[in-house]
Image: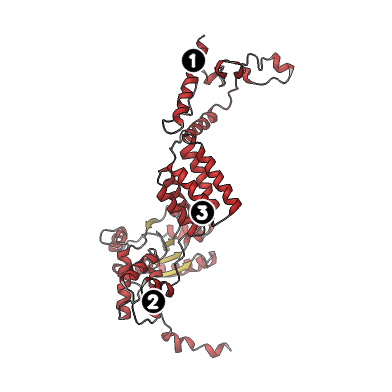
Amino acid sequence: MAGRFDDMPSLFGSQAPRPLADRLRPQTLAEVVGQAHLLADGGPIARMVAARSLSSLILWGPPGTGKTTIARLLAQATDRQFETLSAIQSGVADLRKVFETARQWSATGKGTLLFVDEIHRFNRSQQDAFLPVVEDGTITLIGATTENPSFELNGALLSRCQVFVLKALDESALEQLVQRAEAEMGKKLPLIPEARSGLLALAGGDGRYLLNMVEQVYSAGVDEPLDPASMARVLQRRMATHDKAGDGHYDLLSAFHKSLRGSDAQAALYYAARMMVAGEAPETVFRRLVCAASEDVGMADPQAMVQVITAWDAYERVGWPEARLFMAQAINYVATAPKSNASYLGFNAALRLAEQTSHLPPPLDVLNAPTELMKQLGYHAGYQYDHDQPDAFSGQEFFPEQLAGENRPEFYQPNERGYERDIRKRLDYWSGLRQKRRSQ
């Protein structure tokens, strides 16, 4: 049966339609859009090409920004054999085959450029396989990744590669792609200006996704230009870019937390909404809110923690989507509360000192004496029960002897914002009483 189809590629291969994105793939580095910071005259990659001295590279950037195309064109521009692998579908055995082929090319005087897509998918031992062949020049490696190389690639491999960051395509770059598509198709894209702008926004900086949508619009065969609503019916709305295990997840969380810390309620609501639209679990937002309520608000408004925990508890009882009410209230409370990280900084300072002084014993008078021997040794002797003292404050020393008196540390130093103003007055009052009682 297999023999019946042996001739099919030669009979039908030239008739197979090529996707628009493939037909418009740049043929020179000058045709690549949106990455002028790397490819324009004077850019780091342009300088390598001009010198015909290409080092191994890691191209880090979002999808649809030209990583594969740049690798292919670099091989062409530097007269290297182009080999490509996907880390998702390949293993060490595939790497060894490519390395052996590269050695054969090297024997003829021709270098090999190996492009590895999704290189972060390789585990550490698989990444180690590149080290000797990159080191001895058997291959020039270009790895593509959408994830932060600092976290996903091992240090030995990173030290042998230059990392270049590709940018998501801006509106100008995306418009250039649409114009090229129109030239290829021989007619204008059937969209009114508002729909055209909406199409660029839907692309989210992804050139390949944009061209796929452009092809869908052309394939619709409409007679009149589409408005935004009609275009939306032709296209499926783009799912929000968000990988719960990837950089997108941590980037949005970071922006959310920093918006809370920066007292920007509007931005905090926006980033929380971005996470919800992308399918993030509400618990993720509430966990970050709890951290911000303690780290960044702290004792300046102790109610912040109460508000967040209450909102989280309400979410657990009621569920989504009603829980957006509680989430929004908690976000606005934390974002607009007075800010202080004094508690956080104080405990960090205490941890550092504790690591250095863990051998110091507490004073005997504040330790319990459950046995007769301990009483004879002086445990609990002279302890002053604070509630029996004026103002319920004895002023006795609780620190180890070496940290008492002039060496007494001041870990918690409240600021003058919110409730910490009152706390500062209280601490100053107790400090004055302590000094007075010790001088008596």
Return the residue nearer the eye: 287 or 176. 287
Callout 3 crowding tier (Cα within 10 Å): few <14, some 14–19, many ≥20? some
Q: Do the residues labelled 2 and 1 touch (CB within 8 Å)?
A: no
**Mark number displayed over residue 435:** 1
> Disc 2 marks which residue?
217
Q: Which amino acid does label 3 sit on?
A: Arg
Q: Which residue is drawn at 43% across and 49% down?
A: 268
> Disc 3 marks which residue?
324
Residue 3 placement: quadrant: bottom right
Where is residue 321 drawn, in percent x and y? Answer: 54, 57
Q: In this view, does 255 lie above or below 360?
A: below
Q: Give the range drawn in magenta.
A: 358-362
Where is residue 296 drawn, in percent x and y? Answer: 46, 39
Q: Which element carries disc 2, helix, strand or loop?
A: helix
| Colour basis | secondary structure
The Cα–Cα distance between marks 3 and 1, rounded to whole angstroms, is 51 Å
Residue positioned most to the bottom: 4
Residue 343 visible in this rendered orientation of the protein: yes
Q: Which element carries disc 1, helix, strand or loop?
A: helix
